[in-house]
Image: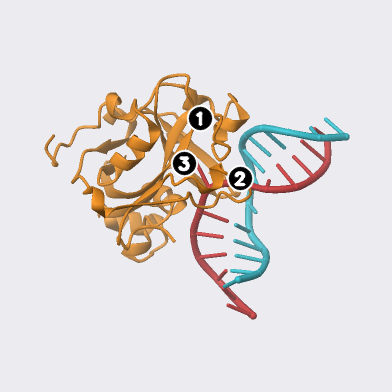
Chain colours: A orange, B red, C cyan
Amino acid sequence: MPSHDSHPLPRDFYTRPTRTVARELLGCRLVRQLNGVRLSGVIVEAEAYIGEGDLACHAKAGRTPRTAVMYGPAGFSYVYFTYGMHWMLNVVSEEEDFPAAVLLRAIEPLEGIEVMQRLRGGKDLRMLGRGPACLTQALGITRAENGVDLCEQESGLWIEHGEPIAKRHVSVSPRIGLGKTPEPWLSKPWRYFVAGSPFVSR
DNA sequence: AGCACGATTAACT
DNA sequence: GTTAATCGTGCTC
């Protein structure tokens, strides 16, 4: 697949094991069409949240209004609100009825940087998409973007193929911010990021 | 109906 | 390193 392919990734890309999806999303381009302006950035950090048995995953609470979209088909967005002020963007993975998703934690800004800077309150380029809540703020993503189909450009939000990241440049670690999540889930190495990228969080 | 807390961030000491 | 900001969600009473 050419690296300049400007079509949304097909649903088949997302209908796979969540860790595979998270790993392969690195290097892909997250695109946001906002008020006629194209904003985008390269995904450099992502985490897998896998099923009701993963006690760090919101689906541990079972099927609720909030988690319903994770039980649906892959390739849809799961956007949730937390800490009273932040929005987080996930992409649903795996087969229908198996609740799992990939949290997008950081992007390297590419297009529409001036608009992103305005949405972020005039922050430095490096800080625009460095963290899951920063990324959604930079792209103008909130409640309205929950449950949209990322395989359709009409959603105004999708992901395109990009420069694949060589395996030796992908680092793995435990997921961030899990607080009092019990072991073994707390230490599962399900966070993937581009080694050495200054746009990775923390 | 009430409550504890969160897949965070920015601004402190 | 510590902490306030701020509210939807899920759990308990």
Tell me the chain of label 2: A
- Quadrant for residue A102, please give it: top left
Would you say B2 lies left or right of A72 here?
Answer: right
The kind of residue on which mark 2 rests is Thr
Q: Amino acid at mark 1?
A: Gly
- Residues under numbered marks 3 and 1 in contact, where contact means CB atoms less than 8 Å apart: no
Which residue in the protein does label 1 denote? A51
Tell me if B13 is positioned left or right of B7 in this view: right
* Mark 2 → mark 1, Cα distance in angstroms: 15 Å
Q: Position of residue A167 (x, y in %)?
A: 24, 48
Instruction: Please state the horizontal and vertical placement of residue A123, each as a whole percent of the image.
Output: 38, 64
Which is nearer the eye, A19 or A1?
A: A19
Query: Which amino acid type is marked by label 3?
Result: Thr
Question: Which residue occupies 18% across, 46% down?
Answer: A163
Label 2 environment density (alpha carbons within 10 Å; few <14, some 14–19, many ≥20): some
Crowd rating for badge 3 (residues with CA inside 10 Å; few <14, some 14–19, many 20+): some
List x then y, in percent, for residue A91.
Answer: 39, 35
